[in-house]
Structures are given as structure tokens and as C-alpha cells.
Image (cartoon, helix red, strand yellow):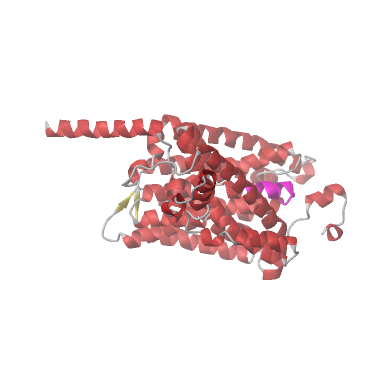
């Protein structure tokens, strides 16, 4: 009888949780990890102001600008704009822009979560899933617009490698060291779904590369054209798979990805800013991210030449680390607290979104813009991606974790970083100059 009552109570709790989910936004693992970078504001500071409009404006500024522990990096944004206006050194513009993107990425996560309180769980979850890697996607689209295909491919692949090896490896390492006397376990269902999608994305990446080496040039077949067509077809397949993944995550199998039960909510959370305020801030910060992304893409070659670091190392290693520092730090903190399901959700979820959404979207957008963006990431880059996905899949196959798994993943990332640090191949010629018949030296 006690077992029956306990079971009924458990079922009632789960039903209550599901009912709450219908009225409250779904918090994804990415949102949960970024929340550790936030700090509560004191409403007393602005409550004494008599004018309502001014009071609401200052309250919004307090929540949006000062409501993050990364607020100290916000001055980098006006400094980057001033540096560009007064024609300071381009490496300085690159560094300041990269630092300015760090708090903006965390604030976009905060604002999408605030908007989701008003839009409902489905729209909110879709918004979170779309904006989860907004910074990387905007940088990639600006690189595509400037025809810097090498920067686009490097940055997107670097985001995947960073999430799978650095974020996941550091989380497993720190979580294992902090919980030496107890076994760390996680739900394999979420890891299996993401691993399957990553392997599908890897197949679509490898097909153009294998096709290029399988077809002999003397046959008279235009390898580049057929590779481009194959990439576009594969990109459509990847986007269809990602849409199915969103439906699977938000509708049919929401309980697999639901991170609410993993967090001890002492207080019932609610929106701290209004819908239109959140929407306005989101639009404004997206425009600022676009501006800084344009600075990053436009000055990366100058930074590479001045610092003596290859473009591949800056794009694959530095940009992903700095751009998603807040989310990465949150994943590590959750691992310390023995909440590996959320840490895995951050690392695998972000990698899946980049691989199955951002990359094929850039191919399709390039198709519309008549830019030859394909899925051929070259042999070295594709080989690193393939081995990374295989290592991670083997690491997560048993549902348990210890610090040695984190050590292996971190060392894999260190080896790949060393590879691209010495990978100093000159950047391809800007296709914009090729199309317009300009001399690259004169156009610079």
C-alpha cells in the first residue's frame, strides 16, 4: 500500500510538472548554463524614482546590462566602435570586438528566456533552439556575405570541436574530480539522439570530400560543380533532420530534454522585464552582435598577420572559446554539482545545432546569394571532426562518467589545437575581388 501511494504521489508530481510546463517556458540546457553568469538586481535602487517611464527604463537597464557577471566586458563594445571610427590598429578592433561578443551572447540567452515566458513553451523552446548559437551564426553569415568561406568553415567547425571536446571534456574532468567518492551517471537517451544526429551530419560532410577524391579529373566531369550540388542536396537533408529534431525535442519526447527537474528551484521564476522590452533589447543586441561580427570578420586577417597566429587557429580555437565563455562556464559548474545531464545538454546540444542547422543554413543562404559555399571542409578539418565525433560517441556509450574521460577529451582538443596552430596556410583569395575583377592589393 505504501508503494502504491508513493507511486501515485510520484505520478501526481510529474503531472503537475507537465502542467506547469504548459504555462511556463521550457528552459533548455543552454539557458540553464548561462544562468550561472547572472546576478540578481536590487529593485530598491530604482524604486525611489518618481517618473514611471524613467523608472522602467532604468529598471530595464539594471536587469539587462548590469544583470550579468560579465558586465565588466560591455565597455569593449564602444571601444571597438571608437577604434574602428578613428582607424586604430585592426588587431585591436578584432580583440575588442571578440571581448564585446562574450557578454552579448549571454544576454541574448537571457532575453530569449524572458520572451519565452510570454510566448508559451513551444514558441519559447523554438526561440531558444534558434538563438542558442546566435553569435556563431551571425559571424558565419557575415563571413559568407564577404565571401570569406574559409573563415566561415573554420569558425563553425571550431564551435563543434569546442563543444564536443573542450566543454564536454572539461565538464567531465571537473565533475569527476569534484565527485571522486560517488559515481556520476547521466541519461543516455539524450546523448544517443545527439550522437546519431552528429553522425548524420558527419556523413553529409564526408560525401562531398569522398566524391572529390573518387572522381578522376580526366573523366571530364566538373568535380567542383557536382560537389556543390551534392552539398546543397545534403544540406536540405540536414535541415529536414534538424526540423525533426526540434519536433522530437519540443513535442513528442520533451521529457528526454527537460532540464527543469534537474535544477533545485527554490523560488518560482518569473519574467523580470516585459515582452516588448525584451523584444526591443533582443533586436538591439542582435544588431550590435552583427556590427561586432562584421568587425571580427573584417579584421581577422590583420590580427593573424600581426600576432603571427594562423587564421585557422584563431577561427577554430580562439573565437569559439571567447564567444561562448559564459555558456561553457555554466556547463562546468553544473558538472561540479553532479548534474551531468545539463552539462551534456549544453555541449551536445550546441554541437548538434551548429552541425545540423548553422552549417546547412549557410550553404542554402549561399545558394540563394549565388555564392559557392559547400560542405567540403578539406581533408584535415573533416578528419578532425570525424575522429572527434567517434571519440565522444565511444566516451558516452555506458552512461557513467569519471575524470579520466575528461582527461582524454581535453587532450584530444589540445592535440587538435596544436595541429591548427602550425597549420599556417595562406587564406584563399577573396572571391568578391575575383568576381568583380579587382586587384586584391588595391581593394584592401
As for residue 142 lying within the magenta part, the answer is yes
Above or below: residue 236 compared with residue 176: above
Q: Is residue 42 visible?
A: no
Quadrant of residue 175 in the image?
A: bottom left
Looking at the picture, tell me which residue is in the foreground, 411 or 113. Answer: 113
Quadrant of residue 418 in the image?
A: bottom right
Image location (x, y in percent) of residue 378: 66, 52
Image location (x, y in percent) of residue 414: 52, 64
Looking at the picture, tell me which residue is in the foreground, 154 or 105. Answer: 105
Apparent side of residue 376 relative to residue 57 in the rendered image (left or right): right
Above or below: residue 208 compared with residue 426: above
Name the quarter where the C terminus is drawn: bottom right
Residue at (55% x, 59% y) in the render: 322
Quadrant of residue 270 in the image?
A: top left
Count of numbered marks: 0
Residue at (52% x, 59% y) in the render: 71
Q: Is residue 271 visible?
A: yes
Apparent side of residue 213 relative to residue 342 in the rendered image (left or right): right
Residue at (84% x, 57% y) in the render: 443
Considering the whole magenta stretch, tell me its main secondary structure: helix
Image location (x, y in percent) of residue 262: 34, 45
Query: In the image as oriented, which residue stretches furthest toward the front?
Result: 50
Name the quarter where the N terminus is drawn: top left
Image location (x, y in percent) of residue 155: 62, 53
As for residue 87 lying within the magenta part, the answer is no
Please give the range of residues in magenta.
Answer: 138-148
Looking at the picture, tell me which residue is in the foreground, 273 or 353. Answer: 273
Amino acid at each position: 500500500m505504501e508503494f502504491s501511494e508513493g507511486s501515485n504521489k510520484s505520478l501526481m508530481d510529474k503531472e503537475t510538472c507537465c502542467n506547469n510546463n504548459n504555462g511556463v517556458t521550457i528552459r533548455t540546457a543552454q539557458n540553464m548554463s548561462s544562468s550561472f553568469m547572472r546576478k540578481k538586481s536590487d529593485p530598491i535602487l530604482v524604486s525611489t524614482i518618481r517618473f514611471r517611464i524613467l523608472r522602467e527604463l532604468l529598471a530595464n537597464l539594471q536587469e539587462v546590462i548590469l544583470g550579468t557577471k560579465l558586465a565588466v566586458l560591455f565597455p569593449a563594445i564602444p571601444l571597438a566602435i571608437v577604434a574602428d571610427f578613428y582607424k586604430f590598429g585592426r588587431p585591436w578592433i578584432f580583440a575588442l570586438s571578440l571581448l564585446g561578443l562574450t557578454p552579448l551572447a549571454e544576454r541574448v540567452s537571457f532575453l530569449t528566456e524572458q520572451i519565452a515566458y510570454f510566448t508559451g513553451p513551444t514558441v519559447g523552446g523554438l526561440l531558444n533552439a534558434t538563438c542558442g548559437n546566435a553569435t556563431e551564426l551571425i559571424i558565419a553569415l557575415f563571413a559568407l556575405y564577404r565571401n570569406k568561406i574559409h573563415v566561415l568553415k573554420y569558425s563553425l567547425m571550431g564551435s563543434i570541436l569546442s563543444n564536443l571536446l573542450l566543454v564536454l571534456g572539461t565538464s567531465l574532468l571537473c565533475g569527476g574530480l569534484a565527485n571522486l567518492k560517488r559515481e556520476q551517471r547521466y541519461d543516455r537517451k539524450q546523448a544517443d539522439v545527439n550522437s546519431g544526429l552528429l553522425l548524420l551530419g558527419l556523413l553529409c560532410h564526408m560525401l562531398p570530400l569522398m566524391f572529390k577524391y573518387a572522381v578522376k579529373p580526366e573523366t571530364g566531369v566538373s568535380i567542383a560543380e557536382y560537389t556543390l550540388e551534392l552539398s546543397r542536396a545534403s544540406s536540405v537533408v540536414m535541415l529536414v533532420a534538424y526540423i525533426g529534431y526540434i519536433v522530437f525535442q519540443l513535442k513528442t519526447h520533451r521529457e528526454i530534454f527537460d532540464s527543469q527537474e534537474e535544477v533545485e528551484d527554490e523560488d518560482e521564476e518569473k519574467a523580470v522585464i516585459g515582452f516588448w522590452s525584451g523584444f526591443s533589447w533582443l533586436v538591439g543586441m542582435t544588431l550590435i552582435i552583427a556590427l561586432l561580427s562584421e568587425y571580427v570578420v573584417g579584421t581577422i586577417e590583420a590580427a593573424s598577420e600581426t600576432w603571427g597566429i594562423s587564421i585557422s587557429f584563431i577561427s577554430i580555437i580562439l573565437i569559439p572559446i571567447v564567444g561562448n565563455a559564459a555558456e561553457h562556464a555554466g556547463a562546468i559548474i553544473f558538472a561540479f554539482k553532479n548534474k551531468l545531464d545539463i552539462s551534456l545538454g549544453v555541449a551536445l546540444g550546441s554541437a548538434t545545432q551548429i552541425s545540423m542547422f548553422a552549417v546547412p543554413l549557410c550553404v542554402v543562404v549561399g545558394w540563394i546569394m549565388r555564392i559557392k559555399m559547400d560542405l567540403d571542409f578539406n581533408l584535415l578539418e573533416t578528419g578532425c571532426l570525424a575522429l572527434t565525433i567517434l571519440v565522444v560517441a565511444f566516451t558516452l556509450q555506458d552512461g557513467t562518467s569519471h575524470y579520466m574521460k575528461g582527461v582524454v577529451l581535453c587532450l584530444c582538443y589540445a592535440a587538435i589545437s596544436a595541429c591548427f596552430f602550425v597549420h599556417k596556410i595562406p587564406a584563399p583569395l577573396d572571391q568578391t575581388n575575383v568576381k568583380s575583377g579587382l586587384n586584391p592589393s588595391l581593394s584592401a
